[in-house]
Image (cartoon, helix red, strand yellow):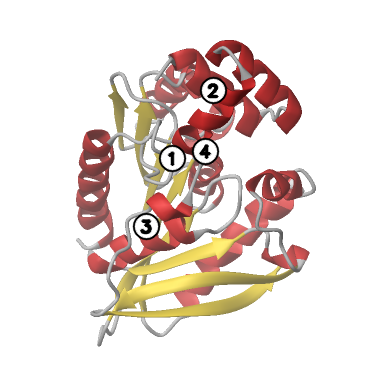
Amino acid sequence: MNQEIIDLYDEYTHKPLSRPEFLSRLAILTGGMAAALSILPMIEVNAANANVTATDDLDTETITYEGINGTMSAYVAKPKNAKKLAAVIVIHENRGLNAHIEDVARRAAKAGYLAIAPNILSPLGELPKNDDELRAKFATLKPEESLENFIRAVSYAKSRKDCNGKVGCVGFCWGGAMANNLAVQVPELKAAVAYYGRQPDAAKVPQIKAAVMLHYGGLDTRVNEGIPAYEAALKASNIKYELFIYDNVNHAFHNDTAPARYNEEAAKLSWERTIGFFGKYLKS
């Protein structure tokens, strides 16, 4: 697909543009509104495209814990009959917890972890189903409160009887930025994996105690601008890190609900690396 179309969609979901403006510009790129509407299913997120990990050998539940601005809810998955496990906090993109992120939690559980996927929007009450409206809800959140609610997710994980006290996190897009910030703010965090997430303030990087893994799409120029400063700060502070840039793939390449941006090869390779990384720092 034309890279200009994918870049426009990225702008739409992250600036964001209004939907009428997005469609108008998309129509210009595609040669008309009919053509624009015909390609929308290929570029927009659609849960129907998601892989679904079987739960026959997993226990799943929805839990709540106290957030700074209300009650937080989270999807939890873990292997059946497990006793003490390392926990992985799974952090969603900028539309709240959805079927895709729940499936990522199940994948982490399949690998032998207590996976906890909070929904940062849950304190806001009943939520819309439309992605545009969900992203609008994000605009009402205070960043410092969102960070505190994920810090509390780490505390909640450690308080569970089925957690062995070791906690890591993995986040995607907005969640990737959150994973980086958790690494800065939570010294007891053992491992943090960020997929195409904004980088933390370089001045705060020396606070990181966790090992860090970073995954970026080579075509994701918006996010990748921050890589050099982040990597320099990690090196200067002697922080254990691994950084991968996947050539010719886009932002959100791991999200199998977005066909035009999803890259199966990069998604599988990056996830294998992520699970190996957790094995090194959470199971050793």
| Residue occupied by mark 4 | 44
Residue in the image at 43% along x and 54% along y: 48
Closer to the N terminus: mark 2 or mark 1?
Answer: 2
Q: Is residue 282 above or below residue 39?
A: below
Are discs 1 and 4 less than 8 Å apart at CB?
yes
Closer to the N terminus: mark 3 or mark 1?
Answer: 3
Q: Nearer the viewer, residue 100 or 67?
A: 100
| Residue occupied by mark 3 | 104
Q: Nearer the viewer, residue 180 or 10?
A: 10
Which dot, 2 or 1, sits closer to the camera?
A: 2
Quadrant housing residue 139: top right
Quadrant housing residue 73: bottom right
Are discs 4 and 3 less than 8 Å apart at CB?
no
* Residue type pointed to by label 3: Val
Q: Is residue 93 above or below residue 35?
A: below
* Residue type pointed to by label 4: Glu
| Residue occupied by mark 1 | 258
Which dot, 3 or 1, sits closer to the camera?
A: 1
